[in-house]
Structure formats: structure tokens, C-alpha cells
Amino acid sequence: MLIAAALLLAGGYFFFGGGGPAPGRSVPLQGNRHIRPGADRSFRYNTDPPTSGPHYSSRAPWGIHDRPLSKGLQLHSLEDGGVAVQYNCSGCPELVLKLRAIVRRYRERVILAPYPTMKTRIALTAWGRIDSMEDFDEARIVRFIDAYRGIDHHR
């Protein structure tokens, strides 16, 4: 029993890069039911941007988007092991360039898109996880992506 606990702690140490708490905060899951396009507009998600809940049967393409993504598309992407990096700012080309540079490091399972209605400048989402920030923090963003990218959440 003691050996199992030690292995679990060691795995968490290496998985989360040094033994600190998991990046972002955990959010109660709201299911993963597939809905028709547009039906996501009437659902009350427990975070904004959402981290789980009803979503479309298709996902958003991995990579950089210049327009906001529907909640239904982004959620299916998260369920498929993706991480979304979203921003809310106008007239901030330097921030967008920095975020693009990070997202370009990953061939798949990462999305960058504007999200003009969220309350913070930057939000990172994965299935059941969120991290929001006002200022660019490259290490924090990369740590979140590396912790959750590629974890499939289909049952």
C-alpha cells in the first residue's frame, strides 16, 4: 500500500512538472451529450468558456482560428483531448502573436481562438479544467497545455 502511494505521488510529480498542484482548477463535469448545431446557445455552462457539457458531434480543427468558435465545437475538441487557448482583447496584436507562437509548437490537439465575451483576457480550457489570466504567462500556458493535451475523455 505504501509503495502504491509513493508511485502515485511520483507519477504526479513528473506528470505535472515538479509536484505542484495540477494546472488550472477543476470544474464539475456537465456530461458529454451530443446535440444538434445551435442547441448549445440555450444551455447554461458552469464556466465561460465551457469545459464540459452538451456539444456537437464534430470538433473544431486543431490550430489557429481568427474567429470565435461555437461552444459546441470547442467542447467536442476538448473531449477529444484538446486544449483551447482563447483571448478577449481588441487592439492587442502583441498578445495574439505570443499566443500564436505557443500554439504553433503543437501539431494537434491545441486550438487558439478569440472569445470576445469572456471576462478575462486569456483563458485555457481542457475537459473539466480551466485557467484564466489577465497577463501573458508563457510558462503557465505551456504547463497547462502539456498537462492536458492528448487525454481523451470519451466513455
Image: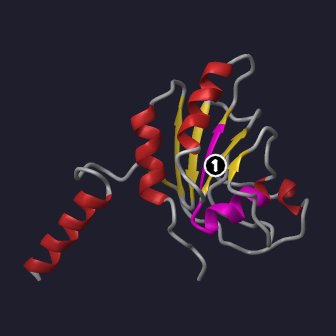
Question: Vertically, is 150 above or below 99?
Answer: below
Classify 10 Å Cα crowding around label 1: few (below 14), some (14-19), many (20 and above). Answer: some
Q: Residue at x 60, y 59 (%)?
A: 108
Q: Secondary structure at mark 1?
A: loop
Q: Residue at x 62, y 20 (%)?
A: 94
Quick one: which residue is furthest to the top in this view? 91
Dividing the picture into quadrants, the one containing residue 36 is: bottom right
Instruction: Judge left or right: residue 61 versus residue 13.
Output: right
Disc 1 marks a residue whose amino acid type is Thr
Residue toward you, 9 or 26: 9
Q: Position of residue 18 (x, y in %)?
A: 23, 50
Q: Position of residue 117 (x, y in %)?
A: 76, 34
Q: Which residues are magenta?
A: 73-86
Q: Position of residue 72 (x, y in %)?
A: 78, 60
Q: Is residue 90 visible?
A: yes
Q: Is residue 24 visible?
A: no
Q: Position of residue 47 (x, y in %)?
A: 64, 49
Quick one: which residue is furthest to the left in this view? 2
Please tell me whether residue 149 belongs to the stretch shown in magenta.
Answer: no
Colour mapping: secondary structure
Please tell me whether residue 76 belongs to the stretch shown in magenta.
Answer: yes
Instruction: Judge left or right: residue 113 versus residue 85.
Output: right
Quadrant where the N terminus sits is bottom left
Q: Residue at x 31, y 50 (%)?
A: 21
What residue is shown with label 1?
47
Question: Vertically, is 115 above or below 110?
Answer: above
Dividing the picture into quadrants, the one containing residue 45 is: bottom right
Q: Residue at x 76, y 33 (%)?
A: 116
